[in-house]
Amino acid sequence: MRLLIRTMVALLATLGLLSACSASDRSATNAPTETSATAARDLHGRVVVLTTGGTIASTADSSGALVPTLTGEQLLDTVRDRFGPDLDLQVRPVAQLDSSAMTLSDTDTILSAIHTAMSDPEVTGVVVTHGTDSMEETADAFRPDSRPIVLTGAMKPADDPQPDGPDNLAQAIALAADKNTPEGAFIAFGGSTFPARGTYKAHTTEVDGFANNAPADSPRPAALPLSPLGDTSVETIAAYPGAPRALIDAAVERGARGLVIEGMGAGNVGGDLAAAIDDALDLGVAVVMSTRVPTGSTEAAYGGAGGGATLRERGVISSGYFRSAQARMLLAAALATGTDPAVLFGQG
């Protein structure tokens, strides 16, 4: 997969839509070069841009706080002149949100809009403009087919003297328009293109602030039938030294059908949390173990009450390379569709 992504990034670079930037761990799939943008005008097909708000559509109000204000047409107007007349660009407003305020019902609305757009066989791909705070959570478990879904946004607001939104949007449109783009969902940001699976926000403010934790040979499960997530309660519990079992007990009492534990190290917790996990499993609550560590995978290596090996024996599912944000969405998708969660985490 990473080879395919590098190939696509190199192709986009020949279109002049990626600017040169310094190499970093957060840009592992990035291979841009400075070239002419002329070829971008040769793209054809139909790309639907779904707008949901976020920093890319935000400007500062009278107090200096950022709020989403730009319409979808205004966003698209910043890049239309980069493409030729053979590329049909359509914009459809879906929401006007700060993505930190999103709920699973909002995610359902976005997913439904993606499926509606892709019901048109003339559509080459779909772009979703999205706030960066929860961009990684609008993932690809419900892809309609093999055509690309590309998420993008911005770190700088639209009224910044040097906004990054237009370049990101142009990059995303070019990826969605190209019929050679590999199957799947992607995040196009800061000159880099990442597969959505395993990608996370790695920096709070930098314009190349995303990274991917997925290994090169990670499997991609089949897409699930579209199902609403809004009524599926999955909670994330952070582990830390001395964390009390009340954190888990309270979530289960509120009706959580699934729990994602943000464990320590490779996926370990203290004794109190371990006891509460055992009780939750006995009640039929699905439990997935992730980690608070930025990179690497969870591993069932340690014994003891809260060790990863012990928890695996009890039925806790490893999130693998997924961090807690994406793990929560995958678990919700599994529960909503009656799918074995292990399948979505590449273990089934």
Image (cartoon, rainbow, N blue to C red):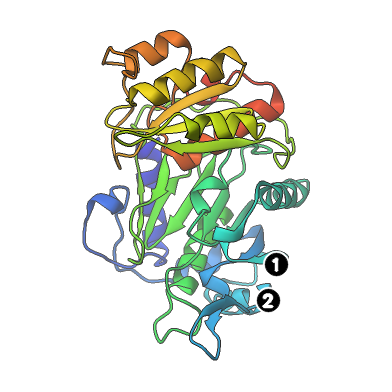
Picture layout, residue 320 above or below residue 121: above
Q: Of all residues shown, which one is farthest toward the left?
A: 23
Q: Are marks 1 and 2 in contact (CB under 8 Å)?
A: yes
Determine which quarter of the picture holds residue 53.
Answer: bottom right
Picture layout, residue 247 above or below residue 135: above
Q: Amino acid at mark 2?
A: Glu
Q: Amino acid at mark 1?
A: Val
What is the secondary structure assignment of the residue under circle 2? helix
User: What separation in Å lies between label 1 and label 2 (alpha carbons)?
Assistant: 6 Å
Q: Residue at x 58, y 56 (%)?
A: 177
Determine which quarter of the picture holds residue 241.
Answer: top left
**Relative to 248, is 93 on the left or the right?**
right
State whether residue 24 appears in this view.
yes
What is the secondary structure assignment of the residue under circle 1? strand
Q: Position of residue 273 (x, y in %)?
A: 41, 26
Picture layout, residue 31 above or below residue 39: above
As drawn, the label of residue 91 is: 1
Instruction: Out of 18 and 318, give the one closest to the viewer.
Output: 318
Q: Residues within 10 Å of mark 2 (few under 14, many from 20)?
A: some
Q: Position of residue 123 (x, y in %)?
A: 70, 52
Q: Which residue is mark 2?
A: 73
**Relative to 8, is 176 on the left or the right?**
right
Q: Of all residues shown, which one is farthest toward the bottom?
A: 62
Q: Position of residue 290 (x, y in %)?
A: 40, 31
- The disc, 1 or 2, on the residue closer to the chain's N-terminal end is 2
Picture layout, residue 158 above or below residue 170: below
As drawn, the label of residue 205 is: none
